[in-house]
Amino acid sequence: MSVLFLEYPKCSTCKKAKKWLDEHGVEYVDRDITTENPTAAELAEWHARSGLPLRRLFNTSGMKYRELGIKAKLDAGMTDAECFDVLATDGMLVKRPLLVGDDFVIPGFKEETWAEALGLDR
């Protein structure tokens, strides 16, 4: 099974996650979230597959998130379509790393969660 791994190469958590994938022999397609940010359509599909609240796809600790006042916009009732459009404008708004498989999408890196989704022993 090959998965899609979206990362920001300078992010220490992304580096740790990539090392973990390599150590566990997981085949993946590596995608730099800043040079090839996800499209609104991809984000909509991934959100549906993730089963998570839409807010979980946002990088809430990022400067761009704060600069654009995204939290206030979300609190004011942004539609899902508006969220996907905003996320698609800049990869730095998307929570990373993002692991995308056939039947799962996981924002952020937690070894236990990734191992379970990939059917691996930690």
Image (tube, helix red, strand yellow):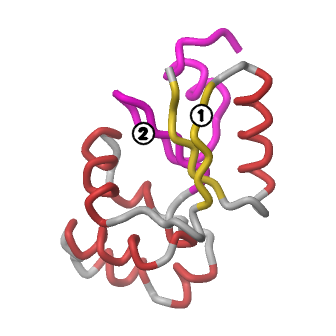
30, 56: nearer the viewer: 30
9, 53: nearer the viewer: 9
Where residue 56 sits: x, y (%)?
Answer: 43, 55
Where residue 17 sits: x, y (%)?
Answer: 72, 40
Mark positioned earlier in the residue sequence (2 or 1): 1
38, 63: nearer the viewer: 38
Circle on res. 2 = none
Judge the density around disc 2: few (<14), some (14-19), many (≥20) Cα neighbours within 10 Å.
many
Instruction: Please state if 98 lies on the left or on the right of 70 as rendered.
Output: right
Choose top left, top right, bottom left or bottom right for residue 25.
Answer: top right
Residue type at tag 2: Val
At x 49% / y 76%, what residue is drawn?
90
Q: CA distance from mark 2 to mark 1?
A: 14 Å
Say whether residue 33 is magenta: no
Say whether residue 116 is magenta: yes
Residue type at tag 1: Tyr
Where residue 78 sits: x, y (%)?
Answer: 23, 76
Instruction: Please state if 11 lies on the left or on the right of 103 as rendered.
Output: right
At x 64% / y 41%, what residue is drawn?
109
Image position of 18 with respect to 119: above or below: below
At x 63% / y 54%, what residue is drawn?
7
| Residue denoted by label 1 | 28
19, 122: nearer the viewer: 19
Circle on res. 105 = 2
Q: Which residues are magenta?
A: 96-122
Tag in front: 2 or 1: 1
At x 45% / y 87%, what residue is drawn?
69
